[in-house]
């Protein structure tokens, strides 16, 4: 039996019949389709979506941000759900490349359906076509290849029959997921074909829990039992596997301390006696000390980014060894580790069984409990006072006020600027979804679009977006979509009139914040060193339809948060913060190259410091 449909109609018919299941819980895989129409998809996918209202279409304002929204949705769904994003050919398609890279780097699923040039080539060159003298089998969509986990172009209708199952295989693969790009020539989208009806039958994609190799597991047990100062690094995989409760039981029993990456923060509660908080270049001073002394590092679902390893300088024990528990073989072998390949929850369950009653020493357990309390006391002090009482308010005080206001299951979202480092150290995470940071790509402009996606993924949670002025100016468009769809969340817009994070980094390498503040150009110097620009971001947000509240201090911020929680639409709380008063870093390093030759004395001094820090790096083979 066959069903005559266009390629676009068949695509949508197939996608809406895909389901996902793990641990016996089954649900539709796709939440719908974000899109912006142009001549490359309006007659194909646009028409197909119009005919399928049960596969809901959402009108977005920016192609990059629609992908960010989809990624945040998948992150809150623990990678057990995704969105489709469609655009026209040309700039509509290439605008999605940043989002595609973000999705793949963060191992989060999203399906992109960009329009493409005519497969027949008859009207070439069409509007927005990239021409090549070397080949006619190329378009701007080829740019998606290096940032996609799976890429295909449908040049004939029957190719769809074989491509769509591969699309789903990759999207639901815990080890291989990321961005999937299915390039759709605009003429082929509209071509009809007699597709087999079996293509459109309901299909449930089971997400299993692969068990580890027994030999690797037994060796891991030996290493753990012989270690004197082991430490666990919980990455995003611990959360996506829904292994957080299992990890809590494992750490409680063994007493092994747990440090967290950006993606893994929230894998354990901040007040658990074994928790040492954020670990790495932006980690707490106590977590850094524990990592420095660890003789065994147990990575769970982490890819060991340079922030986590402090550019490979944080593990200082001369005989340190690594056990990597990961669903991905690629990540499991990093740092010359003992790879334990499997689902994080399944591995921890089996590991706990084999370890029996094994525990770390009483002294080590007591030390970890002590530093957990000591760091929490320090966070309390920072939240209370920031780094001074002179206006404007410190960013740390804003973070502390929000942290104290939010309920346990609420979601805080951030991605860029100076906030990630402060949040990694200070945030008191109370739920696996409480701390939502995109720091694989650290993409400015992710935050507001992500707020929309997170709220769509779980409307029962309050969502709070921390966004700096730089990120806001780059991508604030989906405020309009939130208003249109009646999706309510709260945005804290922090304005310090500059790129604070890069400004601080610029100072650290001797470049004195060059080009990082929002100032007029001075005629005398020719530099951007004049007065601050008279931009009113609060009025801008109001013009997009948001409810806007201005706050100036802790008391007015607390009042604004309470008002936003009861508002009938998305609210932007505008607050000016200090550009210079930030939470200090501790004795960990992040490698940023410094000019080897310079006429600047500050750069020369920074290079000497850089050269000394390079000596602390290690190669793990």
Image: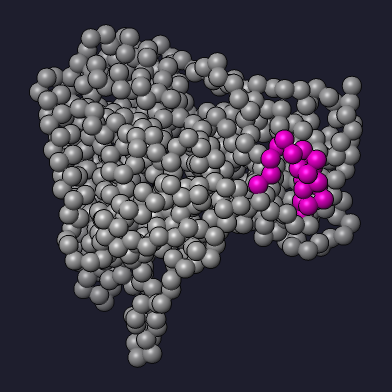
* Residue with the most extreme bottom position: 524
Please tell me which residue is depicted at 47% across the width and 47% down the height of the picture.
Answer: 489
Q: Which residues are magenta?
A: 40-58
Q: Is residue 595 above or below residue 55?
A: below
Quadrant occupied by the N terminus: top right
Is residue 463 visible to us here?
A: yes
Q: Is residue 339 above or below residue 380?
A: above
Q: Quadrant of residue 407?
A: top left
Q: Quadrant of residue 216?
A: top left
Q: Position of residue 450 (x, y in %)?
A: 50, 47
Please tell me which residue is depicted at 44% across the width and 44% down the height of the picture.
Answer: 463
Is residue 154 visible to us here?
A: no
- Comparing 412 with 311, the one in front is 412
Whether 57 is among the magenta residues is yes
Please tell me which residue is depicted at 20% across the width and 59% down the height of the picture.
Answer: 609
As drawn, is 362 to the left or to the right of 400? left
- Comparing 398 with 363, the one in front is 398
Q: Position of residue 579 (x, y in %)?
A: 29, 65
Whether 467 is among the magenta residues is no
As drawn, is 204 to the left or to the right of 526? right
As drawn, is 143 to the left or to the right of 434? right
Q: Position of residue 45 (x, y in %)?
A: 77, 45
């Amino acid at each position: 039996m066959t069903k005559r449909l266009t390629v676009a109609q068949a695509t949508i018919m197939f996608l809406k019949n895909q389901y996902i299941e793990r641990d016996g819980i089954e649900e539709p895989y796709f939440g719908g389709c974000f899109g912006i129409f142009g001549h490359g998809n309006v007659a194909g996918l646009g028409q197909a979506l119009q005919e399928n209202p049960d596969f809901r279409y959402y009108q977005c304002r920016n192609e990059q941000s629609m992908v960010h929204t989809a990624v945040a949705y998948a992150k809150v769904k623990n990678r057990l759900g995704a969105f489709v994003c469609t655009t026209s050919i040309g700039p509509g398609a290439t605008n999605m490349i940043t989002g595609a890279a973000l999705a793949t780097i963060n191992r989060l699923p999203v399906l992109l359906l960009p329009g493409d040039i005519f497969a027949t080539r008859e009207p070439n060159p069409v509007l927005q076509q990239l021409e090549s003298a070397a080949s006619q089998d190329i378009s701007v969509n080829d740019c998606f290849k290096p940032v996609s986990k799976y890429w295909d172009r449908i040049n004939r209708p029957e190719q769809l029959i074989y491509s769509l199952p591969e699309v789903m295989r990759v999207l639901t693969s815990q080890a291989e997921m990321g961005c999937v790009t299915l390039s759709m020539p605009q003429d082929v989208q509209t071509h009809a074909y007699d597709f087999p009806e079996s293509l459109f039958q309901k299909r449930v994609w089971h997400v299993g829990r692969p068990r580890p190799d027994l030999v690797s597991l037994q060796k891991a047990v030996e290493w753990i039992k012989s270690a004197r100062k082991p430490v666990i690094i919980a990455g995003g995989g611990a959360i996506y596997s829904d292994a957080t409760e299992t990890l809590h039981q494992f750490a409680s029993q063994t007493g092994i301390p747990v440090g967290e990456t950006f993606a893994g923060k929230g894998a354990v509660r901040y007040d658990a006696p074994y928790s040492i908080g954020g670990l790495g270049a932006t980690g707490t001073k106590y977590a850094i000390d524990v990592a420095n002394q660890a003789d065994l590092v147990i990575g769970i679902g982490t890819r060991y980014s340079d922030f986590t390893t402090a550019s490979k300088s944080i593990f200082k024990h001369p005989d340190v060894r690594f056990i990597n528990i990961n669903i991905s073989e690629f990540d499991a072998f990093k740092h010359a580790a003992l790879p334990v390949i499997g689902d994080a929850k399944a591995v921890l369950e089996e590991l706990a069984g084999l370890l029996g009653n094994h525990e770390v020493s009483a002294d080590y357990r007591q030390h970890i409990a002590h530093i957990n309390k000591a760091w929490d006391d320090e966070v309390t002090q920072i939240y209370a006072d920031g780094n001074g009482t002179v206006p404007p308010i410190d960013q740390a005080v804003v973070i502390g006020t929000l942290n104290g206001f939010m309920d346990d299951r609420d979601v805080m979202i951030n991605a860029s600027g100076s906030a990630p480092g402060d949040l990694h150290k200070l945030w008191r995470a109370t739920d696996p979804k409480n701390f939502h940071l995109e720091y694989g790509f650290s993409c400015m402009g992710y935050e507001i679009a992500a707020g929309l996606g997170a709220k769509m993924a779980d409307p029962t949670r309050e969502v709070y977006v921390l966004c700096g002025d730089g990120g806001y100016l780059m991508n604030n468009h989906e405020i309009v979509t939130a208003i249109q769809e009646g999706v309510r969340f709260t945005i804290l817009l922090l304005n310090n009139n500059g790129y604070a994070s890069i400004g601080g980094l610029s100072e650290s390498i001797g470049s004195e914040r060059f080009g990082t503040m929002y100032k007029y150009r001075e005629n005398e110097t020719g530099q951007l060193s004049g007065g601050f620009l008279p931009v009113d971001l609060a009025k801008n947000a109001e013009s997009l339809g948001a409810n806007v509240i201005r706050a100036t201090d802790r008391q007015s911020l607390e009042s604004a948060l309470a008002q936003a929680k009861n508002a009938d639409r998305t609210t932007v709380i505008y607050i000016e913060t200090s550009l210079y008063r930030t939470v200090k870093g501790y004795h960990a390093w992040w490698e940023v190259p410094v000019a080897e030759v310079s006429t600047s004395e500050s750069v020369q001094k920074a290079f000497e410091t850089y050269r000394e820090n390079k000596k602390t790096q290690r190669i793990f083979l």
